[in-house]
Image (cartoon, grey):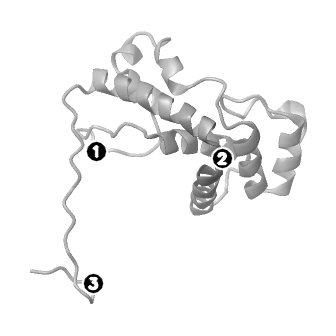
C-alpha cells in the first residue's frame, strides 16, 4: 500500500509513513502504531456536533455517535464512555484497512492497548466523554441508566427459583 493512498480511507487522523510499515506487519502492529502515534483523533465527535444542521442538529448525539449497530427504536443509547470513544476511533481506522479482521481479535487488542495508554491521553478521552455526556443530556434529558437485574444462577447453569 502506498502512503498517499492512506489518507482516503482513514478517519480523523493524519497518516504517517510509519502507518504503511505497521499495516504491512498486520492488524496487531497497526493497532499498536495507531495507539502510540495517532491515539488522539484530529477531530473529536463533540466538535462535529457544533456543525450539524437541519434534522441532524435536532438529534446531535444520535448523529455523532451513530454506529451500524441495530437498536430497538424506543431505547435510548447509553452515552459513550472514554474507552468506547477510543475503541470507536481506532476500530474505524483498523477496519478501513483490514476489512475482514476479526471483531473479537480487534476488541482484545483494543483492551490491551487501552490499558497501556498514558494518563494524558486517557484524560483527553475522559474530557471528550464528559462533552458527549452533555450533548447526550440535551437530546435525552430524562435518561437515567437502569441496568437490567441479573438473575442468580446455581452451579449447573440453571436459574434459582
Label 3 Cα neighbours within 10 Å, binned few <14 / some 14-19 / many ≥20? few
Above or below residue 99? Residue 133 is: above
**SS assignment at label 1:** loop
Q: If you read the primary sequence from the N terminus, does the residue marked by circle 1 or circle 2 appear first? A: 1
Q: Which residue is label 2 attached to? A: 95
Kindly check if marks 2 and 3 are in contact, taking CB atoms under 8 A apart as contact.
Answer: no
- Place of residue 147 in the rendered image (x, y in percent of width and height, measured from the top left): 23, 52
- Place of residue 56 in the rendered image (x, y in percent of width and height, measured from the top left): 40, 18
Which of the 4 image quarters holds residue 43? top right
- The one of 84 and 52 positioned closer to us in this rendering: 84
Label 1 Cα neighbours within 10 Å, binned few <14 / some 14-19 / many ≥20? few
Quadrant showing the C terminus: bottom left
Label 2 Cα neighbours within 10 Å, binned few <14 / some 14-19 / many ≥20? some
Q: Which residue is label 3 attached to? A: 157
Above or below residue 97? Residue 102 is: below
Q: Which residue is label 1 attached to? A: 72
Amino acid at each position: 500500500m502506498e502512503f498517499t493512498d492512506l489518507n482516503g480511507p482513514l478517519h480523523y487522523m493524519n497518516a504517517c509513513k510509519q502507518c504503511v510499515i505497521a499495516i504491512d506487519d498486520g492488524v496487531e502492529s497497526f493497532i499498536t502504531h495507531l495507539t502510540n502515534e495517532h491515539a488522539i483523533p484530529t477531530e473529536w465527535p463533540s466538535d462535529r456536533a457544533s456543525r450539524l444542521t437541519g434534522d441532524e442538529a435536532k438529534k446531535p448525539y444520535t448523529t455523532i455517535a451513530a454506529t451500524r449497530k441495530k437498536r430497538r427504536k424506543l431505547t435510548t443509547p447509553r452515552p459513550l464512555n472514554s474507552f468506547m470513544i477510543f475503541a470507536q476511533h481506532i476500530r474505524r481506522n483498523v477496519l478501513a484497512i483490514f476489512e475482514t479482521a476479526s471483531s473479537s481479535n480487534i476488541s482484545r487488542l483494543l483492551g490491551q492497548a487501552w490499558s497501556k495508554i498514558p494518563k494524558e491521553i486517557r484524560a483527553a478521552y475522559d474530557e471528550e466523554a464528559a462533552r458527549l455526556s452533555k450533548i447526550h443530556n440535551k437530546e435525552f434529558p430524562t435518561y437515567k441508566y437502569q441496568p437490567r437485574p441479573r438473575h442468580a444462577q446455581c452451579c449447573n447453569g440453571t436459574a434459582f427459583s
